[in-house]
């Protein structure tokens, strides 16, 4: 199946009342794990690459791996998405490469750290929307900033999304999906105790959804950081501190209130690292990379398949008839 636009997938998810996991990738094993999980659960899926991932892989390698995924899993609708584009140039280069969706994260300046003002955000996001929609490609914008600086994305300051500004932002930019800041952060260390309403504002999602019922909402920093994955790392020599992520029930509540795209990276990193540590600890004489990359791939597949069932995207792949970007272009026009 050809890569499809985010808008087509999220419109379908809204009609079906489900959410779609957007999983970050940096290498072949992660792509394979996600595609196998999608086949296992018959799920449409979003595969996303950060700027760091594009640099790490040399993005042409990444794009061709995704082309192979589309060819080898013809029954799976896949969106290839630029995660946290920091400038129109980054988004345009992703579109030129063949990405079918981009995030223009204008909530931060180009350094990916300094909070930007509202007018800057509107200006750069609108520029990307004009360029992308003319080519049938979808755009995610962000309003408000997440916490967390450990992965190099984010200001470290939390500014929750303001619902009034969200209405104006969507009207002025024409985005397909809006990432909202509700108290989550990137990385493994989100909360130092199980999150309650004081640190995770799920009611903000309900308010924004009631004001913008036709805008697809996006939750970043949505890894659940399961204790068993952290324990597996520590059991084999890791030194992770106690930590809490976003409970699945909270994400499911979000999905009932307009959340359609759920970004997950950290949970796959944890699964991969734990599996590799186990092999290297238990068989210290092992040096064939396949001996640890295969269990790592299987561990990631397990996590992704579980999320696909929890988010509700499982079994929805057969419903999607892929629309070529040409058709999306006409729809946007
Ligand atoms: O948004 C953050 C993602 O987890 C990607 O992280 O920039 O380290 O690739 P990265
Ligand atoms: P996690 O760090 O919670 O997996 O979030 C990933 C993310 O939001 C990517 O944009
Ligand atoms: Zn993010």
Image: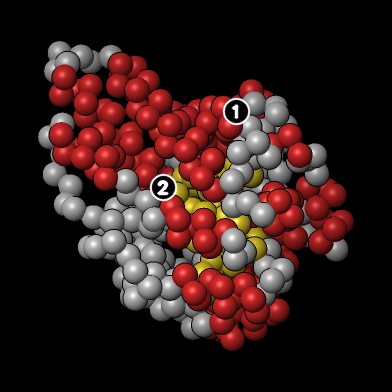
The disc label shown at residue 265, or none = 2
On the image, the x and y values in percent for residue 291 come to 30, 16
Distance Cα–Cα, label 2 vs label 1 = 20 Å
Is 72 rendered above or below residue 106?
Answer: above
Q: Nearer the viewer, residue 245 or 291?
A: 245
Q: Is residue 108 left or right of residue 132?
A: left
Q: Residues within 10 Å of mark 2 (few under 14, many from 20)?
A: many
The answer to which image quadrant residue 295 occupies is: top left
- Of tags 2 and 1, which is closer to the observer? 1
Locate residue 238 relative to residue 119 in the image: left or right: left
Name the quarter where the N terminus is drawn: top right
Could one spot residue 245 in this view of the protein? yes
Q: Residues within 10 Å of mark 1 (few under 14, many from 20)?
A: some
Who's the residue at 21% across and 29% down the image? 277
Helix, strand or loop at mark 2? loop
Q: Residue drawn 39% across and 55% down?
A: 247
Rendered image coloring scheme: secondary structure
Q: Identify residue for label 1.
A: 39
Residue at left 57%, top 27%?
40
Residue 280 got which mark?
Answer: none
Q: Position of residue 306 (x, y in %)?
A: 47, 38
Q: Where on the picture, by quarter, is residue 122?
A: bottom right
Q: Nearer the viewer, residue 305 or 152?
A: 305
Q: Is residue 93 visible?
A: no
Q: Is mark 2 within 8 Å of ligand 1?
A: yes
In primary-sequence order, the first of circles 2 and 1 is 1
Query: Where residue 285 sits: x, y (%)?
Result: 15, 13
Tell me: 130 left or right of 277. right
């Amino acid at each position: 199946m050809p890569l499809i636009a985010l808008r087509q997938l999220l419109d379908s998810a809204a009609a079906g009342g489900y959410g779609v996991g957007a999983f970050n990738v940096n290498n072949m094993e992660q792509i394979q794990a996600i595609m196998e999980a999608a086949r296992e659960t018959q799920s449409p899926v979003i595969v996303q690459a950060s700027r760091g991932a594009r640099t790490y892989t040399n993005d042409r390698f990444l794009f061709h791996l995704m082309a192979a995924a589309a060819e080898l899993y013809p029954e799976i609708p896949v969106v290839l998405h630029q995660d946290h584009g920091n400038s129109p140039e980054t988004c345009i280069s992703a579109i030129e490469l063949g990405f079918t969706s981009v995030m223009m994260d204008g909530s931060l300046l180009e350094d990916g750290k300094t909070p930007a003002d509202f007018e800057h955000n509107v200006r750069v996001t609108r520029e990307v929307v004009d360029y992308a929609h003319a080519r049938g490609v979808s755009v995610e914008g962000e309003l408000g900033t997440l916490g967390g600086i450990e992965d190099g994305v984010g200001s470290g300051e939390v500014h929750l999304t303001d619902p009034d500004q969200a209405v104006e932002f969507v009207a002025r930019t024409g985005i397909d999906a809006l990432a909202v800041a509700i108290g989550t952060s990137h990385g493994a260390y989100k909360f130092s105790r199980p999150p309650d309403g004081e640190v995770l504002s799920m009611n903000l999602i309900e308010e924004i959804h009631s004001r913008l019922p036709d805008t697809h909402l996006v939750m970043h920093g949505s890894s659940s950081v399961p204790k068993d994955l952290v324990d597996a790392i520590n059991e084999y020599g890791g030194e992770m501190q106690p930590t809490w992520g976003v409970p699945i029930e909270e994400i499911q509540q979000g999905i009932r209130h307009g959340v359609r795209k759920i970004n997950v990276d950290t949970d796959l990193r944890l699964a991969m690292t734990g599996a590799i540590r186990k092999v290297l600890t238990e068989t210290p004489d092992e040096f064939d990379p396949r001996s640890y990359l295969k269990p790592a791939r299987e561990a990631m597949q397990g996590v992704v398949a579980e999320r696909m069932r929890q988010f509700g995207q499982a079994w929805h792949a057969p419903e999607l008839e892929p629309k070529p970007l040409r058709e999306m272009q006409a729809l946007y026009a």
